[in-house]
Image: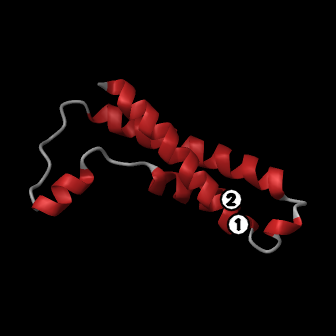
Amino acid sequence: METAFFLIMGWCGTGYPGWLRYLLKKIPPPPDPEPWWHIGIIGLGLVAGVVGGHYFNDAIVDNQFFAGQNAIASGLFAFGASNVTTGIASSLKR
């Protein structure tokens, strides 16, 4: 369950480029000529989410500051790790 949670947080942390612009204008996005780039970014976000979540969870397992909040804190770290990783990868595309 924990790994599935980290996968979900990694998926949610993956930002689709320009999603807010199209959401506010109510215009459908144009078809992308290279859909494999987005699939690769999503895959990278999933991997970064799982690795970041497990790494952070292992780091705070005995810390009393995070007692009872391990899943939430690790999930937020997984979200942030996937967001930063996919943001860097997306910026290198252009």
Task: Tell me the residue at 55%/51% (across/down).
Answer: 80
Judged left or right of residue 80, residue 67 is right
Question: Disc number at residue 7?
Answer: none
Question: Disc number at residue 74?
Answer: 2
Name the quadrant containing residue 32.
Answer: top left
Colour convention: secondary structure
Judged left or right of residue 51, residue 94 is left
Q: Which residue is mark 1?
A: 71
Residue 22, horizontal then vertical, whole percent = 17, 55
Q: Are marks 2 and 1 in contact (CB under 8 Å)?
A: yes
Figure check: 82 above or below 90: below
Which amino acid lies under the numbered mark 1 shown in the image of this protein?
Ala
Q: Residues within 10 Å of mark 1 (few under 14, many from 20)?
A: some
Figure check: 73 above or below 90: below
Residue 31, horizontal then vertical, whole percent = 14, 41
Figure check: 46 above or below 3: above
Task: Tell me the residue at 55%/54% (across/down).
Answer: 79
For residue 1, say whether it is visible. Answer: no
The quarter of the picture where the N terminus appears is bottom right
Judged left or right of residue 43, residue 93 is left
**SS under mark 2:** helix
Task: Please give the count of numbered marks on the rendered protein.
Answer: 2
For residue 90, say whether it is visible. Answer: yes
Q: CA distance from mark 2 to mark 1?
A: 5 Å
Which amino acid lies under the numbered mark 2 shown in the image of this protein?
Ser
Name the quadrant containing residue 41.
Answer: top left
Residue at far front of view: 65
Residue 18, horizontal then vertical, whole percent = 24, 47
Task: Tell me the residue at 43%/48% (across/down).
Answer: 14
Residue 68, horizontal then vertical, whole percent = 79, 74
